[in-house]
Image (spheres, grey):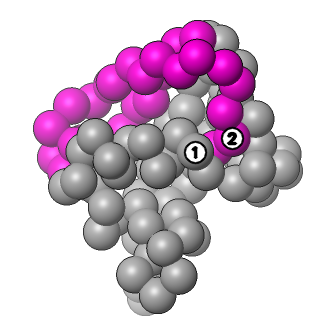
Amino acid sequence: MFITVRFLGSLRAASKKNIITLNFERTISLRGVINTIVKHRPTLSRALIGPENDDPRTNVLMLVNGKDTSILDGLETVLQDGDELVIVPVVHGG
């Protein structure tokens, strides 16, 4: 099964690509996709994985097929063949 991952904002430079396609043998959770991305693109590790708990960071917005994963099952959201994951860095300030 294929998952398309689109990087926006500063993540484009860190990933060196706007879009990547990942191939998995079966359905996979969002957490598993993020771990796979970091494994194949270590430059994204700092942006996507929190050093304090090895969990995906909360400073990125993740959308699966246009829906915020916080209204789905969060990191346990199961992705299917053909799904698109969009990862957007969130900038805070004031």
What residue is rendered at 76% in x and 50% in y?
Answer: 76
- Residue 8 appears in the rendering: no
Q: Position of residue 29 (x, y in %)?
A: 69, 41
Toward the viewer: 50 or 93? Answer: 50
- Residue 77 appears in the rendering: yes
Q: Position of residue 19 (x, y in %)?
A: 33, 25
The segment highlighted magenta reads 1-30
Position of the N terminus, as image quadrant, is: top right
Name the secondary structure under disc 1.
helix
Q: Position of residue 23 (x, y in %)?
A: 47, 17
Q: Which residue is mark 2?
A: 29
What kind of residue is marked 1? Gly
In the picture shown, does residue 7 fall above or below 76?
A: above
In the picture shown, does residue 47 fall above or below 34?
A: below
Kindly indicate whether the residue at mark 1 contacts the one at mark 2 (C-beta within 8 angstroms).
yes
Q: Is residue 16 left or right of residue 76?
A: left
Rendering quarter of residue 47: bottom left
Q: Is residue 27 left or right of residue 71?
A: left
Q: Residue furthest front?
A: 25
Neighbour tally class for label 2: few under 14, some 14-19, many 20 plus, Cα within 10 Å: some
Q: Is residue 60 magenta?
A: no
Position of the C terminus, as image quadrant, is: bottom left
Q: Which residue is mark 1?
A: 32
